[in-house]
Image (tube, helix red, strand yellow):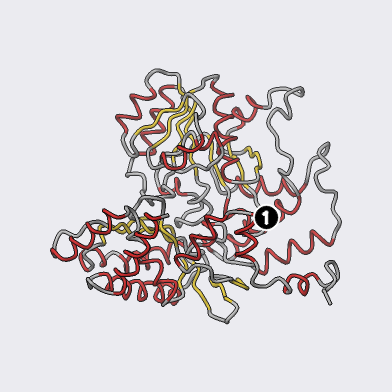
Amino acid sequence: MSADFYGEFQGWLKEHDGEQYDLHDQHINASFVKMLRTIGFNKGYVRGQGSYLWDAQGNKYLDLLTGWGVFALGRNHPKIKAVLQQVLAQDMPNLVRMECSILSGLVAKKLTDHTSEGLSRVFFTNSGTETVEGALKFARAHTKRQKIVYCDHAFHGLTLGSLAVNGADFFREPFGEMMTGTVKVPFNDLAALEQALAGKDVAGFIVEPLQGKSCELVADGYLAEAQRLCRKYGTLLILDEVQCGLGRTGKWFCFQHFADVEPDILCVAKALSGGYVPVGAVVTRPAIMQSVFSSMEKCVVHSNTYGQNDMAMAAALASLHVIEDEKLVENAAAMGEYVMGRLKPLVGKNPFVSAVRGKGLMFAIDFARPESSFKLKMAWDMLHKINFGVFGQMIIIPLLQKHKILTQVAGYHTEVIKFLPPMVVTKEDLDWFVDALDSVLEETTHFPGTAWTTVLGLAKGAMRA
């Protein structure tokens, strides 16, 4: 007898245990399901708490993917959950629209307490990509210009406006012509940036202080000089901290690691949700906000249906309080320093590790063709002739299968693995990770061997597909 959908929802849901991959294969994204099954990532997790996931067999996994950074405060944080339960129980007058919500006002105040004095206005969104879309529109409205400058290897989202400032052609190719008026410059190249801005026709320069796909950090002095150039040529500086903001790098915002930097527009999302309800924010200056909402007639010229909804605002407000109260920014700084200290010796120890980089609890390992060992060079070349960019699978698959650590390659056709531990991570967790990684990396030095057999099989399978 089937459980009552409303009265026994968890029981009803349990009746469908094990169906998720078939349902997704039939109704959502068959290619994604095939990928998960091919690399053995179809675990069927049943519970998440803090830094960990559990599967149906009771195995405990360390989550270093954190839903692409959404679960920066850990999974199912009890304090955020308690706030949301209270909001649900109150039957609040949600999304009246012709009204001002106390919750969104309080979130805006709390958020801007941690930015800087000039950034005092907030527009709330439902995602990171929508936040970027809003920032681009605000820059155009304020400057009355059309062009947007962005950096190579950037990732700002996958809706059409955000995609137009995405540094990877891989994501753009299937979707035809992009938004016009965008100009790409090399990351960390001030001369190229000045050349792009010199025509005084650029509305905004958008940049990630710490790039999401590669974990490349802006060079010392780059942001301050980019800000000077933007002001010189009348361009707005837009910082995308959707992924690196809200404490992850060991400061409330990554730009705060650098002196004399205050963007004109700041993009925030992911961690603001507490992992519960999608929410993002465009944080900007009063004059920029006023140029968008310039009159009573234009007071909703830019809007969204679900923006400022009570559940999202409660999740955001609770998340900001948790970050403060549990000193998660400080923990991210300390744990980031600790793990980088353990990871950096891998450069030189393992012939494939070419770089370890990042800031705080957002870091990556880059792999490259070894300079020594003819046998390992031959193995690398053989793999890359079959399929470029699958070496990272040799690392992430055994990390999951043998060591119960979940992570992901940083991007398509790259040799980078990125790690996004939750800001509640402990030294014990990081030791678990580094010891496991050291063991997996050691296996890559044996050719032929199990690790190479597995990844060569994957590469050949991908070529056939």
Residue 421 percent across, percent down from the top left: 47, 64
Residue 286 percent across, percent down from the top left: 62, 31
Residue with the mark numbered 1: 277
Count the labels in the image. Answer: 1
Q: Is residue 57 depicted above or below 86 in this figure?
A: below
In the rendered image, is residue 169 in sight?
yes
Q: Quadrant of residue 351?
A: bottom left
In the rendered image, is residue 331 in sight?
no
Q: Quadrant of residue 160?
A: top right
Considering depth in this image, is 48 or 388 the residue closer to the camera? 388
User: Among all residues in the image, which is located at the extreme front?
Assistant: 464
Instruction: Residue at 50% x, 51% y: name it.
Output: 243
Instruction: Residue at 31% x, 74% y: name it.
Output: 450
Q: Is residue 32 depicted above or below 45 in this figure?
A: above
Q: Is residue 351 left or right of residue 339?
A: left
Considering depth in this image, is 83 or 312 the residue closer to the camera? 312
Q: Is residue 104 left or right of residue 158?
A: right
Q: Is residue 437 depicted above or below 416 in this figure?
A: below
Considering depth in this image, is 403 or 17 the residue closer to the camera? 17
Amino acid type, mark 1: Val
- Mark 1 Cα shell of 10 Å, populated few (<14), some (14-19), many (≥20): many
Residue 10 percent across, percent down from the top left: 76, 72
Q: Quadrant of residue 341?
A: bottom left
Q: Quadrant of the N terminus?
A: bottom right
Instruction: Residue at 82% x, 74% y: name it.
Output: 2
Residue 240 percent across, percent down from the top left: 49, 42
Q: Quadrant of the C terminus?
A: bottom left
Considering depth in this image, is 279 or 225 the residue closer to the camera? 279
Tag 1, which secondary structure?
A: loop
Instruction: Residue at 86% x, 56% y: name it.
Output: 91
